[in-house]
Amino acid sequence: MSNSTAAKAKRAGAALGPGPKRAPFVGNLFNFPEKKWYETFSSWATEYGDIVYIDLMGTPMIILNSLDAIQELMEKRMRIHSGRPHTTLVCDMMSWGYILTLLQPNKDFTEQRRLFQKSIGPRVVQEYDSFVQQGCPELLQRLSGFSGEPLAIVTRILTWRRTMGDILTRIAYGEHFFQHHGTEIIKYNIEGLEVIAWAFTRFWFVDVIPLMRYIPTWFPGANFRRVGNQGKHYANLIRYWSFGQVKAAMEKGITDESLVSKYLREGGISEDNLRDAVSAMYAAGVDTTSITITHFLYSITLYPEWQKRIHEEMDGVLGRGQTPTVDDVSKLEILAAVLKESLRWNPPVPLGVPHVSSQEDEANTFPGFVLRDPRLWGEDSQEFNPDRFSPDRNPLADGLPDVWSVPFGFGQRICPGRHLAQRTILLYAAVILSAYEVLPYEGEHLSPNEPFEDSNIRRISHFRCTFKPRS
Ligand code: HEM
């Protein structure tokens, strides 16, 4: 059997698609974008179609731009398309290869995914409603009189207190741990993630020549050794320290509700897999969720007519001034449609997370393109139009893809936190709008083409707004 790149990709199950011109030996090294992948991938999708094939110095990569192609490879053939890329610096030297998002499919992967399914899957996720609801009063209080970048409130300030960071820390490790060490573990997560995000967006020779990891730190150009040690310091804290604290407290007879104490008591999962699975929750859940709420605030500030419709719906269904509960949220259809449209229009992970096939090629699902594909959403797919989800206004509404699924990935690797994310985002959006009108920052005019930051987790840059109490 031929071992050429093309033959490998074919064996992986993909028809070898067209793609940008490849040079001998280096393939697409010189026309692969250094930055703004999202823009280049979008233009390649328009130019070359549903399956774009590229080659980076012998590493074949497929970019999938249609829901059909993604479902065919990632769902029907998930057994061979569910690996992750392995990089020497982040996975080996920084020791982050253990975390579920980067773990290769194996026995540990299956056990950890099962834990997520059992603990925050669709049948049980409501058990955490009280944790989620606890964050509302402080969220409202912090927004009072606030004018500026809401992401700072939703992520940076509130992660220290009561929003996603708190919720996930409490769910994973419990109230006792949260009260005593919440601030520390959240700080370690924030700092650790900054180091990884920085390392991921740079080219490292050690990823091409893994033996370089053994050169001494004093050697000229060995800066990557220091970066590796720094990343490893945080990986160890996040992986072992919090779990050890909860275990030690349990040995002293202190137990409360948390995933760690529950499964340490009940068993059914190895201690190592329990420890590793819960340590992934913060990293994967906080930024994605906070950005989704921020993009929603951007959409309703940009389109005040939709904000008005949500306010009218809330006043009619719940009564003015009532703070909604998780149960109320299911009655708010316009709110749900606007949130879905905002997530479709600007998903936080538009490039997806690469899947590596066991036949060695790498497939990048491209949900950002799929979520704006006119074949799925209609001719106005580039526009913001929540009415597309209303069967009264769009006869095709019932046949649209599920927005609570596509931006969360595919197949065996689909986001295991999506049900929790959906419940939290809907509640926080409703709670904010029950109390505030969200207005453009004084003197600023927003456009539908505001710039976004250039990273895999894609957030709007410098969006500012003002929260005016509803009179
Ligand atoms: C709006 C919020 C969120 C979005 C848009 C999102 C999106 C994603 C995406 C695109 C992936 C990669 C899927 C793939 O490879 O096909 C992923 C994986 C993951 N997500 Fe989320 N996520 C969100 C919230 C959360 C939350 C709240 C948690 C945890 C409680 C979480 C935990 C994870 C984990 C552990 C993985 C890795 C799964 C694996 O590699 O097998 N996510 N997410």
Image: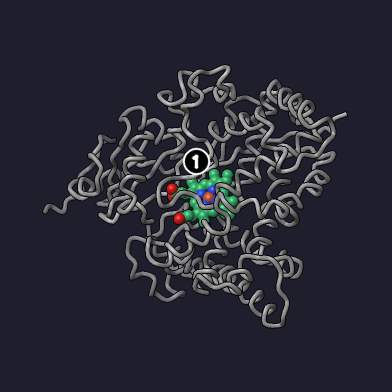
Residue 272 point in image, percent of width and height: 50, 73
Name the one closer to the observer, 221 or 235: 235
Q: Colour scheme of this structure image?
A: one colour
- Residue at left 85%, top 34%? 321
- Residue 111 in the image, given as x and y percentages of width and height: 45, 65
Is the residue 193 above or below the residue 213 in the image?
above
Where is residue 241, by image quadrant?
bottom right
Residue pointed to by mark 1? 405
Residue 40 x %, y % = 40, 35
Query: In the figure, is residue 467 to the left or right of 117?
Result: right
Residue 440 is situated, as x and y percent measured from the top left of the image, at: 74, 28
Instruction: Tell me the element at label 1.
Output: loop
Q: Is residue 25 visible?
A: no
Residue furthest out toward the bottom: 252
Query: Residue at the location (51% across, 24% down)?
Result: 397
Q: Amino acid at mark 1?
A: Ser
Q: Quadrant of the N terminus?
A: bottom left
Foreground of the two, 6 or 336:
336
Residue 276 visible? The answer is: yes
- Label 1: few (<14), some (14–19) or many (≥20) C-alpha neighbours in 10 Å: some
State the residue in front, 350 or 116: 116
Count of numbered circles on the image = 1
Quadrant hosting residue 393: top right
